[in-house]
Image: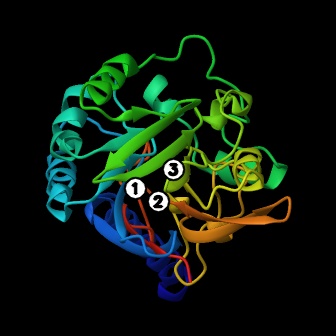
């Protein structure tokens, strides 16, 4: 009898322990990733860029708010916010409180689908099924009628007031002690809000550096940015896979990028050109799946250095 039930009970206990760890510990184990990217012209001083992404703020997440506030102590040259700030239609005040110290620095932002729309309860297994079927999350379609609309306009107005550049299908500029940074961004490809034709034309020749920014790293966006010669693309959306297998990695990306590039620094090649790509694993989760496993929440400090 003991042998008959021992294995199932052990597996159940291990599963319960893993779930408790994923929901109670790792999801609050915030980390700072540090990355060096050689994309600057020779002779230019290094630039420190703080990327925050996929905050998915829900009321009462005090530890997350304090951690985000603490990132201002890094004193970055500028901040890039790659979207999905909200997971609660009432979360705008807490999001702005968390980002307040960072909004004292120059910055820019794009929005993700969860900034516009409230999340829905969804079976997590569907992400894996859709990956096998060649579909990706919302499959490029806007959420159905009846989904809660988040007050993204309040976020936009606060970011704009702080002087952050809105890169939703737009270009922007940051001036840093005589250095000109040109930025080109897209609205979220995950819900077909991207309009590359509106920002096409490639890097701006009179800028010291041009960067590309998008929430979801869909291949059509990466291809377009890379083909036009952007040296670095910043994205989020994937949560790094969120539930990963130790020593193996992510099973899903929730878009059409491969799992090998689900987070961190990699490269992308299109039309004979190659760009650096950095995908943030983000620091939050959908409010209905508040778990992470083998994929801690993060922000990234990118140090941009001169090309070899």
- Which residue matches tag 3? 207
Q: Residues within 10 Å of mark 2 (few under 14, many from 20)?
A: many
Question: Is residue 118 in view?
Answer: no
Q: Is mark 3 on a helix, strand or loop?
A: loop
Query: CA–CA distance between discs 2 and 3?
Result: 29 Å
- Left or right of residue 60, residue 278 in this image: right
- Left or right of residue 16, residue 96 in this image: left
Q: Is mark 2 on a helix, strand or loop?
A: loop
- Which residue matches tag 1? 291
Q: How crowded is mark 1: few (under 14 residues within 10 Å), some or many (20 or more)?
A: many
**Mark identifier at residue 235:** none
Percent across and percent down for residue 206 are: 55, 48
Q: Residue at x 59, y 29 (%)?
A: 169
- Which residue matches tag 2? 281
The reply to whether the C-beta atoms of the residues labelled 2 and 3 are less than 8 Å apart is no
Viewer-proximal residue among 224 and 127 = 224
Viewer-proximal residue among 1 and 46 = 46
Q: In this view, does 214 lie above or below 31?
A: above
Disc number lying in front (2 or 3): 3
Tell me which label, 2 or 3, sits earlier in the chain.
3
Q: Residue at x 16, y 36 (%)?
A: 97
Q: Residues within 10 Å of mark 3 (few under 14, many from 20)?
A: some
Q: Image quadrant for the C terminus?
A: bottom right
Viewer-proximal residue among 187 and 108 = 108
Percent across and percent down for residue 141 are: 71, 27
Q: Is residue 7 above or below residue 204?
A: below
Residue with the most extreme top position: 146
């Amino acid at each position: 009898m003991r042998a008959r039930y021992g294995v199932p009970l052990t597996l159940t206990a291990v599963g319960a322990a893993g779930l408790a760890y994923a929901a109670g510990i790792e999801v609050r184990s915030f980390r700072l990733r540090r990355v060096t990217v050689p994309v600057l012209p020779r002779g230019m001083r290094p630039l420190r860029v703080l990327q925050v992404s996929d905050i998915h703020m829900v009321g009462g997440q005090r530890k997350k708010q304090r951690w985000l506030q603490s990132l201002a102590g890094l004193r970055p040259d500028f901040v890039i916010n790659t979207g999905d700030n909200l997971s609660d239609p009432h979360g705008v005040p807490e999001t702005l409180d968390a980002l307040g110290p960072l909004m004292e620095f120059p910055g820019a932002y794009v929005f993700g689908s969860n900034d516009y729309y409230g999340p829905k309860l969804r079976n997590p297994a569907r992400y894996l099924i859709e990956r096998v079927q060649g579909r990706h999350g919302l499959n490029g379609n806007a959420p159905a009628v009846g989904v809660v609309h988040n007050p993204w306009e309040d976020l936009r107005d606060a970011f704009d007031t702080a002087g952050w550049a809105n890169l939703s299908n737009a270009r922007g500029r940051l001036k840093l002690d005589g250095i000109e940074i040109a930025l080109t961004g897209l609205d979220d490809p995950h819900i077909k809000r991207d309009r590359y034709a509106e920002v096409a034309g490639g890097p701006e020749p009179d800028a010291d550096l041009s960067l590309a920014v998008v929430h979801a790293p869909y291949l059509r966006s990466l291809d377009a940015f890379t083909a036009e010669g952007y040296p670095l693309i910043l994205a989020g959306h994937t949560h790094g896979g969120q539930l990963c297998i130790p020593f193996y990695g992510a099973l899903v990306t929730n878009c059409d990028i491969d799992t090998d590039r689900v987070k961190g620094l990699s490269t992308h090649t299109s039309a004979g050109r190659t760009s650096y790509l950095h995908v943030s694993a983000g620091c939050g989760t959908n409010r209905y799946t508040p778990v992470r496993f083998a994929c801690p929440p993060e922000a990234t400090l990118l140090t941009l250095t001169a090309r070899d």
